[in-house]
Image: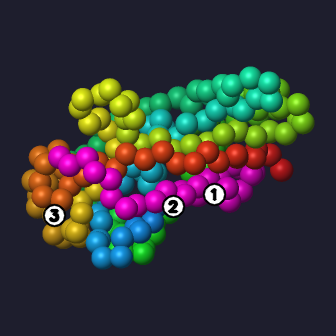
Amino acid sequence: MASNSPPLSLGLAQTSNSPPTVNITVTNNSPTETYTMLKWSSPLDPLALHLGLISVTIPSDSSPSTPFEVPRIMLKRAMPPPDDAFVILAPGESASQDIVFRDPVVDMDNLVSAATEASSSGASVVDVQIICGNFDEDEEVDRGGATVWVGKKREDLTEEEVSSLGRSGGDGVVRWRVKSEVLKLEIGS
């Protein structure tokens, strides 16, 4: 499987602070190429927060940021993926989703308390970042990342390509490993 990264960009924006909501947008910056992305284990996965793709840290005025634990789940998804598990991005197109930080996935009382304690201003702010894929430079095996097919729409993918989630190394499949910029997420009213 190729590991070169497609020209996709990732953006985060806060759309609400009560409940705290982050909009995640993936944009195809290629002038000519279409990309089909499997949403599973990608920034566009509706379960991205549950799966640990979203890093939450508590910034501190006096010390390094402290990770905030969001319980992770393991799940087994039905194969083959349904058609709505894919997103097709033509040149210049974007796809997005909102991730809402709320109980029971995120212990909001503890998150607000930890964020407020760490700040000398009393503001409740956390750092949020999408991390999709393994970024260990010493790692010989490409682990993780979103599965992306280059130049193919969903209907162009063979059943083997879909059922193997791209691991069969077919033509044009890549792993998109990406880290977003850090978003300062305000919590509260």
Residue type at the position of mark 2? Thr
Image quarter of residue 177: top left
Magenta stretch?
1-24
Near mark 1 (Cα within 10 A), the count class, few <14, some 14-19 or many ≥20, is some
Dot placed on the residue nearer the N-terminal end, 3 or 1: 1
Q: Residue beneath label 2, please?
A: 25
Three-letter residue code for mark 3: Leu
Q: Position of residue 174 (x, y in %)?
A: 25, 52
Q: Where is residue 109 shown, x and y percent of the image?
A: 74, 31
Q: Secondary structure at mark 3?
A: loop
Mark carried by residue 157: 3
Residue 93 on image: x %, y %: 42, 73
Are there few (<14), some (14-19), or many (20+) residues within 10 Å of tag 2? some
In the rendered structure, the answer to whether residue 23 lies left or right of residue 188 reads left
- Disc with the residue nearer the chain's start (2 vs 3): 2
Residue sitting at x 83%, y 50%: 189
- Mark 3: give few (<14), some (14-19) or many (20+) Cα within 10 Å: some
Residue picked out by circle 1: 13
Q: Is residue 38 visible?
A: no
Please give the label number shown on residue 30. Answer: none
Q: CA distance from mark 1 to mark 2?
A: 8 Å
Nearest to the eye among marks 3 and 1: give it. Answer: 1
Q: Residue at x 72, y 32 (%)?
A: 59
Q: Circles 1 and 2: CB distance less than 8 Å?
A: yes
Q: Main secondary structure of the magenta part?
A: strand
